[in-house]
Image: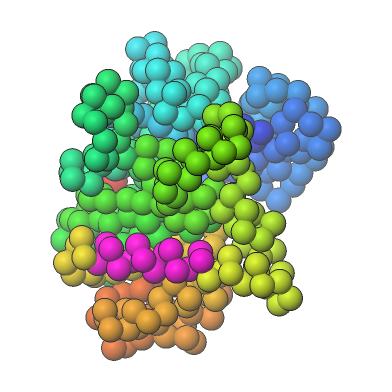
Amino acid sequence: MTYLVLNCGSSSIKFESFAVPSLRSRLRGQLEAIGTARARLRWNREERPVTAADHDQALTLIAERLAREGLRPRAVGHRVVHGGERFHRPVVVDDAVLAAIEAATPLAPLHNPVNVAGIRLARRLWPEADQIAAFDTAFHQTLPPRAFRYAVPTPWYRDHGVRRYGFHGLSHAHVAKKAARFLGRPLARLRLIVLHLGNGASACAIENGRSVDTSMGMTPLEGLVMGSRCGDLDPGVLLHLLRQRQLSPEALERALNHASGLRGLCGHSDMRAVHRAAATDPDARLALELFSYRVRKYIGAYLAVLGRLDALIFTGGIGENDAEIRAACLEGLEAFGLVLDPARNRQPRADVLPLHAPESKAAILAIVTDEAREIAENMAALLNDPTLEPPS
């Protein structure tokens, strides 16, 4: 028996199967480019082209692949992007929970419909398995009102849910626990800043194991510069474009989500391509500078929020692998006690890689995130497997 973790995106499904009770990874993969002639199924170190016209066909192919390996899920965990204010932790999905996830669609129109479709398909394919929803927003439900409220008319919050929810919560929670284990200190006594830097990027201030502030807002658009998302933006810009260019809400949404960020600045959304272009393209050099400057601003803000800092954590594809960006994000912060060791920073990626110099007042760590494992650990705790401790 295994736990299966699914992450359904708009054109891909990531999956990983974990043995029970050890939570050893058995099979992991991704079916990508759903609905195109380029659809491919990758698992462990193998891959093959497939025909997957839609998510139904894609998940059926994944189920067949698991069956050939003799892997039958005891429970299926689903990464759900938005849980609104209702969900503070993972839950077993029943009809009421599914309806609540669907009701949060206006808050995450690009994500929740696909998450709901994945749950419905998994229910049909594995009717005997528990379906578990794990929410990217749940970790941030500990934010105090001063951090999650916007200074807009109260009815906007009360009637329409206009507030900061935060995202990447599964990743922030996972690497915070890893940091506590590495430092040999209880998470409940640590003050941490986590920087999840990838195509999507967010910062989180964590005090005693609880998220107390985060950069993403009501949607994943707010905060840091991202691959194709704008990050922080004066809302007056949108009003100006609506008036002067007569852009539709749909056109604005596409531009802010898919044509902004690094892509908007220099034409590349992949940080590796931005680095290559920076040798000759001043726009790419500006994109690198703007990306790291925005991160640095949030580090300073969260130092003020926390009062003191035990560790600063880099994670995500950029945070785990890009030594140049890490150094740029920390430039000039030595006065705040954050001192990077250049030699350590150039070392190859590791599960937990210490980056700080001996004189640094806080640890600086690059930690590999694993949202699928975080979901599996929460599934084990939720389903009360007696051989497993709940995640600390």
Magenta segment, which residues?
290-303
From this viewpoint, which residue is outermost toward the top? 95
For the question of whether residue 370 can be seen, the reply is no
Residue 42 position, x and y percent, is 71, 43
Magenta-drawn stretch contains 297: yes
Q: Which is more toward the observer, 4 or 219?
A: 219
Q: Could one spot residue 273 in this view of the protein?
A: yes
Task: Write the residue at 28% across / 57% down.
Answer: 205
User: Measured from the top left, where is residue 200 in percent x and y?
Assistant: 51, 50
Q: Nearer the viewer, residue 353 or 313?
A: 313
The quarter of the picture where residue 254 lies is: top right
Is 277 placed above or below 139 here? Answer: below
Q: Residue furthest front?
A: 244
The structure residue drawn at horizontal position 36% and vertical position 18%, both measured from the top left corner, is 100
Q: Quadrant of residue 167?
A: top left
Relative to 3, does residue 264 appear above or below in the rendering? below
Q: Please tell me which residue is depicted at 26% across the width and 35% down the height of the picture.
A: 152
Q: Position of residue 353 (x, y in %)?
A: 44, 72
The residue drawn where x is 69% and y is 57% is 267
Q: Image check: 126 left or right of 213?
A: right
